[in-house]
Image (cartoon, rainbow, N blue to C red):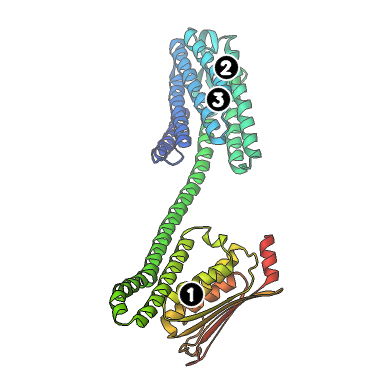
Amino acid sequence: MTLVPIFLSIVAGICLYVGLFHLLIACGRLQTTLHLCFGLVCLGCVSYILALMLRYQAANVEDYIAAQKLVCFVGYIYAVAVVWFMAVFTKIKPVRLILVLNSLYVISLLINQISPTGIIYSHVSSLSSVSLPWGESIYYPEGTLNPLFSFQLLALNSNTVFAVSACYLQYRRGEKQAALSLGLSLAILVAAAQHDRLVDLGKIQFIYLAEFGYLSFIVIMSLRLSKDLIQAVKLREQLLESERLRKIAVEVERNRLARDLHDSVSQTLFTVATIAEALPRVWKRNPEVAQQGLEELAQLTQGALAEMRNLLIELRPDGLAEKALGELIQQLTKAISGRASLQVTTTVEVDLPLSSEIKLVFYRITQEALNNIIKHAQATEVSVSLEYDSQKIVLRVSDNGCGFDLTQIPIPSGHLGIAIMKERADSIGANFHLSSYLGRGTEISLSWSTPTLKKGNQE
């Protein structure tokens, strides 16, 4: 029975498949260095197994020595690749130390190539046949061990110490699952390598197990890397989705600003230009009417200026945070009075220091309420008041417009603007109330208690 070559062929096929898989992942530019190193480790394992199959097939001393030197040569290159993979995987990269560890393998490799019989034996007299438990026979050399074989043992033990240290540091850094996966796979690999050293020393007569240690290392680490890759892909998709939503939000905000500019500033400036063009002719015929036009022109200009300031404030991320709430509300009412033929009364008490979140909610609700008045209320008078006392802050916005029947427009599902205002109030724990009657106008009130303010500031 020739089970050993069959097993080795299966192991080589698995390692080749895994290696090519991770090289393809590296070509996709996702964790490129890590998957490239691991792919090279897998291909190094395939080369080692193919060389090992040649050694098992050797029937004379010359063929055995040539195959053994090839096995050692490929094994040293594989070991160097494993060391660099561990450094990249654990993010422990003491380059000088790794170069020293690699130099031990380089010295062993040179000794192996220079010596006529390789690094393990200084003299091989003959081959002896050993029968395995399932009846298959393999050949072992009979000869004298090479004293320089200690370089190989030193290289193996030194790299084992580095691997254990890297796993420990990775575990201490908080990457426990990754460190445990690497530690388990390395423990199996080192145990198999130590078994093979006992075979080389003649202490055990059995097949070499390093290839199965390599297989366990590759399978465990491939599963670990695949899991990390899936998480990285999901994170990348989340980032792409966040970027897509950010672009949509930017586009929506741009459209809103463009609409606001058109609805307010653009129309106001058009009216200003029309009045300014007509004033010289009106002045010649009726100076009193022209004087009224100048006053209207001044009011429109101030409103347009206030509206532009509001838009500039919203464009700056810290624009709302820098100004007091009372100043912001006065800016809004000034802009509204310039846009529409409204008599706006604004009452603001002494401002208290408020967090940006609180100011933003009061600002947006006032803005939404005033916009609704312009669009729907058909009002001629608007009152806006902001009151402070030791316990709460109250905002009231009322008009003398047409009003509406609350029973005909359920809150919040029936009216999107009202729903948005209520949601904003709920976000800071404020009380929102709306009252309206047909023909008698509408009033909204927003009440926010100062204990919530103190808690918010502490947070």
The type of residue carrying mark 2 is Gln
The type of residue carrying mark 3 is Val
Q: Position of residue 267 (x, y in %)?
A: 35, 72
First in sequence, mark 2 or 1: give its number: 2
Is residue 62 among the parts visible in the rendering?
A: yes
Q: Indicate the quadrant where residue 402 lies.
A: bottom left
Is residue 2 among the parts visible in the rendering?
A: no
**Around disc 2, counting alpha carbons within 10 Å, would you say few (fewer than 14), some (14 to 19), or many (20 or more)?**
many
Question: Is 97 placed left or right of 370 in the picture?
Answer: right
Mark 2–mark 1 Cα distance, whole angstroms, equals 78 Å
Q: Is residue 147 above or below residue 90?
A: above
Instruction: Identify which residue, 394 or 165, lies in the foreground.
Output: 394
Q: Can you identify the residue that label 1 sits on?
A: 368
Mark 3–mark 1 Cα distance, whole angstroms, equals 61 Å
Q: Can you identify the residue that label 2 sits on?
A: 152
Question: Is 361 placed left or right of 7 in the picture?
Answer: right
Quadrant (top left, top right, bottom left, bottom right) of the C terminus: bottom right
First in sequence, mark 3 or 2: give its number: 3
Q: Position of residue 316 (x, y in %)?
A: 48, 58
Q: Position of residue 398 (x, y in %)?
A: 53, 83
The type of residue carrying mark 1 is Glu
* Element carrying mark 3: helix
Q: Can you identify the residue that label 3 sits on?
A: 95
Q: Is residue 234 above or below residue 15?
A: below
